[in-house]
Amino acid sequence: MPKRLVPIFGLMAVWLGLNRSAALAYESCIPPAPIEALQMADVVFAGKAVEANQQAWRISHIKFDWRPPFIHLDEDRDRYRSTFEVTMVWKGEVTARTSIIHSIAGCDGGYSFRKGEEYIVYANWFEGELYNAWCHRNNPLIAAREDLLAFGAGKPPIPHPSSLADIARRLSVLFLFLALLGWAIQGLRRKYGDQKS
């Protein structure tokens, strides 16, 4: 009987050892070097947090059922949104005002930003949004000397789309106003004609 249990206990010990080492590696994540982190991220930028840790409520799954209420929504409430006024970009297409989704705590770690502070931010695209994952090299900009030395001078961000849209909207309103004014003047000329004094 004991001889039969030896392989079982051996397999259990190996399984527990592997799971424990994976758990320890997960808990003690050491961010990679700046160049490796730059290669792994889709976007790397420096910016000032203008909104920090706002809860980003979103629907993670939609399930349909034949019984009322017919539609069941699974909510993802442990996600937060922080918005940055971007000053410098080292990787990716980043607008002057960019938001990222992140967690603050929980099983996937997280990072908490402070409003008004400047950071270097590493993020990846997922389902059309920028996500900041556990173990990225996020840091306050004053503590990111190693990153700044490794990356050198960056490039400025793309102008914020809303400002470009705002300019286009104002120009279209101006052209519409001028067209209506021209149409009104043309109508008055037709109705009253050119009167000679």
Image (tube, rainbow, N blue to C red):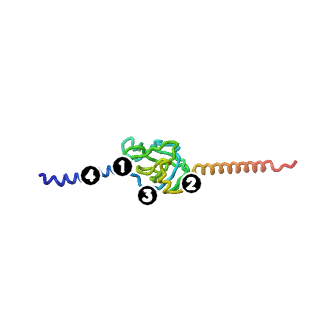
Relative horizontal placement of residue 194, taking residue 42 as reference (left or right) = right
Which residue is disc 4 drawn over?
A: 17
CA–CA distance in space, label 1 to label 3: 18 Å
Count of numbered tags: 4
Q: CA distance from mark 1 to mark 2?
A: 34 Å
Quick one: 98 or 24, which is closer to the camera? 24
Q: Is 138 situated left or right of 192 in this image?
A: left
How far is the residue under mark 3 from the one under mark 4?
Answer: 29 Å
**Residue 32 in the image: above or below residue 55:** below
For this orientation, the residue located farthest to the right is 197
The residue lying toward the viewer, choosing from 111 and 100, is 111
x then y, percent, for residue 155: 55, 56
Residue that badge 3 annotates: 36
**Disc with the residue nearer the chain's start (2 vs 4):** 4
Q: Any mark on residue 28, and which?
A: 1
Numbered disc 2: secondary structure: loop
> Mark 4 or mark 1, which is nearer the start of the sequence?
4
Q: Is residue 71 visible?
A: no
Q: Earlier in the sequence, mark 1 or mark 3?
A: 1
SS type, badge 1: loop
Dots 3 and 2: beta carbons under 8 Å? no
Element assignment for label 4: helix
Q: Earlier in the sequence, mark 3 or mark 2?
A: 3
Judge the density around disc 3: few (<14), some (14-19), many (≥20) Cα neighbours within 10 Å.
Answer: few
Q: Amino acid at mark 1?
A: Ser
CA distance separating discs 2 and 4: 48 Å
Tag nearer the camera, 3 or 2: 3
Q: Amino acid at mark 4?
A: Gly
Q: Which residue is mark 2?
A: 156
Could you give the CA–CA distance between mark 1 and mark 4, rounded to whole angstroms? Answer: 16 Å
Residue 65 place in picture, x, y as percent: 37, 45
User: How far across and down, in percent of the image, does residue 15 sit?
Assistant: 25, 52
